[in-house]
Amino acid sequence: MRSPEEYAGTRMHMPDYPNEGALRGGHIPGAKSIPWARAINPDDGTFKTAAELTALYVEQNLIDPSKEVVAYCRIGERSSHTWFALTYLLGFEKVRNYDGSWTEWGNMVGVPIEK
């Protein structure tokens, strides 16, 4: 749900915001980079159709609806948008939102990080 720069570890926060929140940059091992805004229509801010969302999450990024999915961003705000889309618009049954998100993970000692 984070920006490509956050996923790569070159930023700790969304573009155009102060670079704050975590001591380390990168992403949780195994995470996929699917920025939350790809699920909306840029002209009016509405969600894309179910077919378009399925193409984005399932076909392009190989998210398996039968497996557990954990959405995260920096503090759980952007990822809640994706949690809603997967849960209520696509009917995924095993979706959770990681409230602590990158601010928690990026500050923990000893947890793995990929860049």
Image (tube, rainbow, N blue to C red):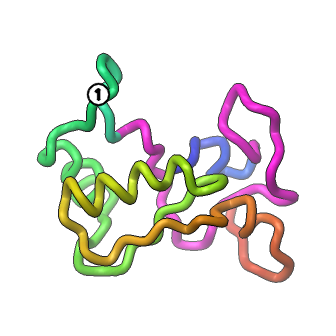
Say if the magenta span includes residue 31: yes
Mainly helix, strand or loop, the magenta region? Answer: loop
Q: Going 29% across and 27% down the picture, which residue do you hit? A: 41
Say if the magenta span includes residue 68: no
Where is residue 48? Give x, y as percent. Answer: 22, 37
Where is residue 88? Give x, y as percent. Answer: 23, 58
Q: Count residues near mark 1 (Cα–Cα under 10 Å), then give few for <14, some for 14-19, many for 20+.
A: few
Q: Which residue is at the front of the view, 66 or 47? A: 47
The quarter of the picture where the C terminus appears is bottom right
- Under mark 1, the amino acid is Asn
| Left or right of 63 on screen, residue 26 | right
Q: How many labels does the image show?
A: 1
Q: Which residue is at the front of the view, 85 or 61? A: 85
Where is residue 87? Give x, y as percent. Answer: 28, 63
Q: Going 39% across and 53% down the picture, which residue do you hit? A: 82
Q: Which residue is at the front of the view, 26 or 71? A: 71
| Residue that label 1 marks | 41
The residues colored magenta run: 11-38
Q: Is 105 placed above or below 67 here?
A: above
Q: Going 41% across and 49% down the picture, which residue do you hit? A: 81
Q: Going 47% across and 44% down the picture, which residue do you hit? A: 35
Q: Is 86 placed above or below 77 here?
A: below
Which residue is at the far left? 51
Q: Is 14 placed above or below 60 here?
A: above
Q: Which residue is at the front of the view, 5 or 66? A: 66
Where is residue 72? Give x, y as percent. Answer: 54, 60
Dot 1 lies on which element?
A: loop
